[in-house]
DNA sequence: CTTTCTCTAAAGTGCACTGTGGCCAGTGC
């Protein structure tokens, strides 16, 4: 009987949710949540320890949790949990994904109206039944419907960061097949779109039917949608659809170009090919009539662009947003690469809501080959995240200064993620901020302000000489929550004028600011910092997603603060904001 | 449910915001 620590932690979290639904003592539910976190972050073989009843000296695990963990670790399940679960219909859990619904409101919807699914909720909102419940007024209903709408709109979408590990594993598997000559993932994954509908695999082979057969019988496959001799489609356990095309080695570059899209980019490229007298499709570049000579041979995708007298266009730029014109003039920029990063800002530690200590974060950054790491724990307004008051912050600054003594090739920068309050003032006074190396100012509440108020609020923060950068500019959560209303244009102008950096938050749930704004921002002279917003050492890996989005936004290494060397960034931060 | 202070029982993250309902409750950070 093996159960993973993550599975155990998930069960404890679900118990907490169920207890909340039942209206249990909040401290009891908190104990289960805490228990889940303790299990997740436990240093050591927590499952084996639980099986051996060896957890009694662990802080946060008392007698009751110890017994339940023992049952989970030895039998793989927990009667207490299963009984609790049986009291509610499974669809009820989906309701918690709707913004504005917590345990109390879910309970009342279920008890009073029998609502146990998102569909049922939508119906009750539309026909007026929901409005009859206490606490559900006109605006609440509107908000619920908007949130349901967002969910439906993105029902078949997945976040880039959530599918990337799977995508790369599947690609590796395909590459290892003896009949595979070349393999790639095309489509929006290759273009680094922040959310994806499906994955498009492409394999060059002389045995296409063998490959489609192989693909549809992989262990990851949940169901087979289609399987022909050259084309197959499967669905994975998580619902993600994966298409595969098997083509000849000669066709591969054309197919790769074609299936990488975007459609708009391809339309523009095809019309350019026509001007040269060729017709371009997924199979090749063929003369459009007898007067045209045959096209030069193509071995790589880049050859297609070369033949059409274009710079090679990186897949990330293929959205028909000026890349063809730029390639025509030889003005495709050299885009930033992961290897260019020298450090990063905006990382949390156990001092607020991170799960790795200051020392662990520093070690992890050094292991990644970074020269510096900025620490930015939450400020006091983020109480639930154990936000720091000035005294604790200044003690952390001292720890950082003293840790820094031991390195001459690495440095921690002492910062904060300071809350931008409703009126645009900051959660720390200037005399606190000026003791730090830098600051990230972020919004964590009052999302509903009007566009004008919200814009003014951020501009006020940017005008503060101690605000180095703005964190997650729009506050969006991909597939879950739209960003707050902002005049991005005005904010970019102000960022350029005040020398305030706009962060590119590369937590895969955010990827904020959106890539569509970065090209313009860059042209206005705005600088970015690619920040993982890491709450644990492993999340420093998010930097790779940040690079993908930065590239999609046409950014070069010179547009990114954390591509600067330690010496450069040190002297940059030392200058007054206006002179940077 | 856990911890702690006290020894069996009490205390245990805070605050702003929003919308609604009539001065408070629920949610989210």
Image: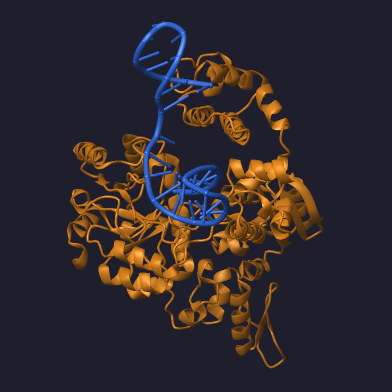
Report the residue that reaches farthest toward the bottom.
A291
Question: Where in the figure is residue A373, as x and y percent of width and height?
Answer: 31, 47
Q: Residue at x 65, y 67 (%)?
A: A259
Nearest the viewer among A537 and A327 is A537
Percent position of residue A410, x then y: 26, 44
Query: Does residue A564 appear left or right of residue A10 in this picture?
Result: left
- Left or right of A17, for residue A541: left
Residue A421 quadrant: bottom left
In the rendered view of the protein, which quadrant contains the C terminus of chain A? bottom left
The one of B15 and A457 positioned closer to us in this rendering: B15
Rendered shade, chain B:
blue
- Asked whether A376 or A383 is in front, the reply is A383
Going 59% across and 41% down the picture, which residue do you hit?
Answer: A104
Compared to residue A308, the image places residue A356 above or below, namely: above
Task: Chain letter for orange, please.
Answer: A
* Up-down relation of residue A104 to residue A200 (above or below): above
**Residue A356 appears in the figure:** yes
Quarter occupied by the N terminus of chain A: top right
Instruction: Using the image, determine if residue A249 lies above or below residue A320.
Output: above
Query: Residue at 55% of width from left, 64% of height from top?
Result: A191
């Amino acid at each position: 009987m093996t159960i993973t620590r993550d599975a155990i932690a998930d069960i404890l979290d679900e118990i907490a949710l169920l207890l909340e639904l039942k209206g249990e003592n909040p401290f009891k539910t908190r104990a289960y949540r805490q228990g889940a976190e303790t299990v997740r972050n436990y240093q050591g073989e927590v499952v084996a320890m639980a099986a051996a009843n060896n957890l009694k000296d662990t802080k946060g695990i008392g007698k009751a949790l110890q017994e339940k963990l023992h049952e989970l670790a030895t039998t793989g399940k927990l009667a207490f949990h299963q009984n609790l679960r049986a009291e509610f219909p499974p669809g009820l859990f989906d309701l918690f994904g709707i913004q504005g619904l917590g345990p109390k409101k879910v309970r009342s919807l279920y008890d009073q109206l029998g609502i146990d699914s998102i569909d049922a909720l939508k119906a009750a909102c539309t026909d007026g039944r929901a409005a009859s419940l206490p606490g559900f007024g006109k605006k609440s209903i509107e908000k619920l419907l908007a949130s349901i709408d967002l969910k439906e709109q993105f029902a078949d979408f997945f976040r880039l960061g959530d599918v990337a590990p799977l995508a790369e594993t599947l690609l590796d598997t395909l590459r290892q097949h003896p009949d595979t000559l070349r393999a790639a993932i095309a489509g929006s994954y290759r273009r680094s779109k922040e959310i994806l509908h499906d994955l498009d695999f492409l394999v060059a082979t002389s045995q296409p039917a063998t490959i489609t057969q192989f693909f549809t019988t992989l262990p990851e496959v949940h169901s087979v949608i289609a399987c022909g001799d050259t084309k197959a489609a499967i669905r994975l356990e998580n619902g993600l659809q994966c298409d595969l095309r098997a083509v000849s080695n000669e066709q591969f570059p054309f197919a790769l170009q074609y299936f990488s899209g975007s459609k708009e980019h391809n339309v523009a490229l095809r019309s350019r090919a026509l001007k040269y007298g060729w017709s371009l499709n997924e199979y090749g570049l063929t003369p459009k009539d007898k007067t045209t000579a045959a096209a030069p041979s193509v071995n790589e995708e880049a050859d297609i662009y070369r033949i059409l007298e274009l710079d090679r266009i990186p897949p990330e730029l293929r959205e028909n947003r000026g890349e063809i014109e730029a390639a025509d003039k030889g003005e495709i920029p050299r885009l930033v690469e992961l290897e260019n990063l020298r450090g990063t800002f905006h990382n949390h530690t156990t001092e607020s809501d991170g799960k790795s200590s200051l020392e662990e974060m520093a070690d992890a950054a050094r292991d990644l080959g970074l020269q510096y790491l900025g620490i930015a724990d939450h400020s006091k307004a983020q109480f639930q995240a154990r936000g720091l008051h000035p005294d604790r912050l200044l003690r952390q600054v001292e720890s950082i200064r003293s840790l820094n003594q031991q390195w001459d090739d690495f440095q921690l920068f002492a910062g904060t993620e300071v809350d931008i309050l409703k009126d645009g003032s900051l959660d720390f006074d200037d005399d606190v901020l000026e003791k730090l190396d830098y600051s990230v100012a972020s919004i964590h509440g009052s999302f509903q302000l009007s566009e004008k108020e919200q814009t003014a609020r951020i501009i006020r923060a940017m005008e503060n000489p101690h605000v180095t950068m703005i964190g997650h500019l729009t506050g969006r959560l991909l597939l879950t929550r739209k960003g707050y209303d902002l005049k991005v244009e005005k904010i970019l102008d102000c960022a350029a004028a005040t020398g305030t950096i706009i962060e590119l938050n590369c937590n895969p749930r955010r990827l904020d600011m959106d890539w569509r704004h970065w090209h313009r921002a860059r042209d206005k002279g705005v600088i970015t910092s690619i920040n993982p917003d890491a709450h644990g050492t492993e999340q420093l890996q998010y930097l790779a997603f940040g690079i993908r989005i930065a590239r999609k936004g046409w950014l070069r290494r010179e547009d990114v603060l954390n591509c600067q060397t330690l010496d450069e960034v040190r002297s940059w931060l030392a200058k007054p904001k206006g002179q940077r």
